[in-house]
Amino acid sequence: RSETTSRGTPELAMISATDGTEAVLARTVQWDSLLNSRLVTETDVKLIRAYDGQGPLARRAFLEQSGPDLAQALLNVLRNVSHQDTTDYVLCLIVEMFVEDKTNAVYFHRAPGTHEGDAYADLFRVLAKPHWFAQEKALFCLSHLVDARLGKDLGLSAVAAACGGDQAPSVNAKPMGVAAQTVVQLVQWMCAQLRSPSHATRSVPSVVAALASMLVVRDVRPLVTHSGGVELLAPLLLPTSVASSTLSAYSSQNEVPKRDVQLLYEVALCAWLLTFHPPALAAMRRNGAFTLGLVDVAKRATKEKVARVSVLALRNIAEGVGERSANSGGAGAAGVSTSSPPLRGVDEASLLKTLTNLSQRGFVDEELVVALEDLRCGSIARSRDASGWDVYVAELRSGSMSWTSAHCDEAFWRENACKLTDNNCALLRVLITLLVPEAATSGDRPSMESGGSSTTPSMHVSSKTLAVACHDVGEFATHYPAGRFLVTDLGGKEKTMALLTHPDDEVRKHALLCTQKLLVANWRFIGRE
């Protein structure tokens, strides 16, 4: 849907921005020693002392009169003093200034002794220090500088276009300066933190909070996508991946961690903002983890704002809004997509049930209610189209199958069972590989051209996929002449019988039914007199 909604961008709350600042600001900075060392000037120290220790009203009045001068003094200290305690102190002053009023960041853009972008560069240098507290505060400040930029154009248009942006740079576009270069480096730094966090519990939430703020800038989205941010954000929506990145504390290592609500909200917000960048949206549609994660977050959300942003992101993914925007040049058409493309990894019956339950929760947000209805209509349309052969092939080759209508449709198997034998039984071979809990990855499965196999890295096959694969092998054996013998020759019977001892009841049930179909021609009469 359109990026600008009736209520604008969903509310963004910062994650623990002031954690630890009170203790740092309680310290005494040896300003006289720094003056004697000529690392700071008397003017800078006078400004900082005049501001520090005042009450909120006095600080506000001081900033109205001397805000740019104070910003320049703080940046001078960051630039010239390497002592970590002093750096932490100055960063905490800036953080508190921004927390009290985010528009205070404008003073750093208007500091009298700086060139454009100097504030970005001075704060970014802090990120190179191996000290997480300072990195976290500098990251918070940098995201606010981007949000409070004096002009919409940061000078990123050229590099954004090179990274897959959907708009070519204008002839009047601002040239790439220090600010743009720093933002590019900052995005790369944040993605590196998502890959390998510097801090076990605080890196990921802090980076996600900064991304949620910065992705409002259109030209930042191609940079995040190009740096792998889409793939790095997807696992954070799933409960098994959030444990190591949540801010919550746990009573014991064996306790199942609770997912941090604010973190989930901001990951979903990042997803929603990225859906307006076509390459990012395409990546989300390929990655079933995004869809599954957003559905799970919406289903478990206790706060309406969390459900809202999750559902809005899910609707954009389902309807391909960003792709339509790129093709039509608009911001995305209203209404449910007529093509109803399949959602990878989603069980439409389960999704429809979740949407129905959400619709009955009495949400007051009108846009959320409309989005739920759009998703429901789209799910019904996809379920209606799910019996198509092309959809079945796409699901089969994805390596993740669910109980869509095609699997249980007798007419579908009568019409299409023979197609599994095309091209030297290529698709049948793929189906049989899914009868093993550890199956070859999609790139290593039997080739559609050669029908060969490979012994390379494997992926975990879910219990649901195993059960569906057993069912489909049985249906092929039943509906294709001599199908029982063909499956046996390709190793399908041996793999199916191995699943008779699988720990999952559903897998054992369908493995038994499949084995009966493979062993007995008239299997339906087993047990009858």
Image (cartoon, rainbow, N blue to C red):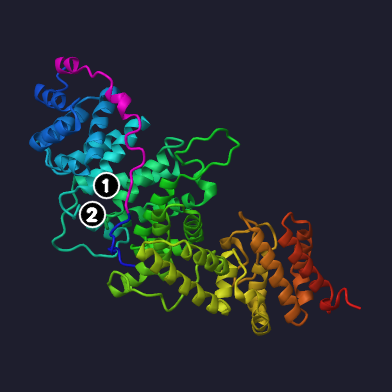
SS for dot 1? helix
Residue drawn at point x = 78 percent, y = 80 percent: 482
Q: Position of residue 280 (x, y in %)?
A: 38, 60
Q: Quadrant of the N terminus?
A: bottom left
Q: Residues within 10 Å of mark 2 (few under 14, many from 20)?
A: many
- Image: magenta residue range: 11-36
The answer to whether mark 2 and mark 1 are in CB contact below 8 A is yes
Q: Quadrant of residue 490?
A: bottom right
Q: Quadrant of residue 508 in the image?
A: bottom right
Q: Give how far apart the Cα atoms at labels 2 and 1 are.
A: 9 Å
- Which labelled disc corresponds to residue 183? 1
Q: Quadrant of residue 82?
A: top left
Check disc 2 and report the residue beneath it.
156
Taking the spot 15% from the left edge, 28% from the top edge, the residue there is: 51
Residue 252: x percent and y percent?
57, 33
- Judge whether 130 appears above or below 341 on screen: above
